[in-house]
Amino acid sequence: MSDAGKVPAELKYTKSHEWVRVEGNRATIGITDHAQGELTDIVFVDLPAVGKSVGAGASVLVLESVKTVADVYAPAGGTIVEVNAELKAHPEWINADPYGKGWIFRIELAAPIDPAALLTPEAYAEFARSG
């Protein structure tokens, strides 16, 4: 796919197509518009347990679409403090509003995220376009 989709300027991104909104020592994570477009219609979200510890780069959950399954990874180490439980009944929100109602989980960061570990919106858009 050559189109990077929507890439909000206020977020940071990973090469595994997650978006990250850091607020203090917490981060909200979802998948990018590009990723949801590649997955097509998401039909199931296997949410992690609140309280689960995750390592940076670890698979946190699996999304199932009509086309495939895909892992969602933690951009940093920490503890899951909240999940978007509404996605159990409405997995399609990830397709319809990936940066809003389709957020997936929040982690309390074990340490600040290294800025070099995340992509700027411009760098992510270029990365997504290139393949």
Image: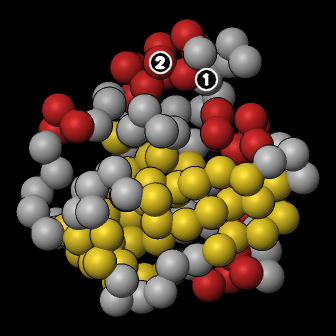
As shown in the figure, which amino acid type bears the numbered disc 1?
Ala
Where 1 falls versus 61 (above or below)?
Answer: above
- The N terminus, quarter of image: top right
Residue 127 placed where, x, y %?
47, 18
**The image quarter in which residue 32 lies:** top right
Residue at mark 2: 127
Secondary structure, mark 1, is loop
Q: Residues within 10 Å of mark 2 (few under 14, many from 20)?
A: some
Callout count: 2
As shown in the figure, which amino acid type bears the numbered disc 2?
Phe
Position of 65 compared to 122: left or right?
A: right
Position of 81 compared to 71: left or right?
A: left
Q: Residues within 10 Å of mark 1 (few under 14, many from 20)?
A: some
For the point 16% across and 38% down, the residue is: 115
Camera-side residue: 6 or 131? Answer: 131
Residue at the left extreme of this rendering: 111
| Tag 2 near tag 1, CB within 8 Å | yes
Camera-side residue: 42 or 46? Answer: 46
Residue at mark 1: 4
Which is nearer the N-term, disc 2 or disc 1? 1
Residue 95 placed where, x, y %?
75, 52
**The image quarter in which residue 71 lies:** bottom right
Secondary structure, mark 2, is helix
- Residue 15's tag is none
For the point 46% across and 59% down, the residue is: 59
Residue 131 placed where, x, y %?
59, 15
Can residue 33 be seen from the camera position used here?
Answer: yes
Where 55 falls versus 123 (above or below)?
Answer: below
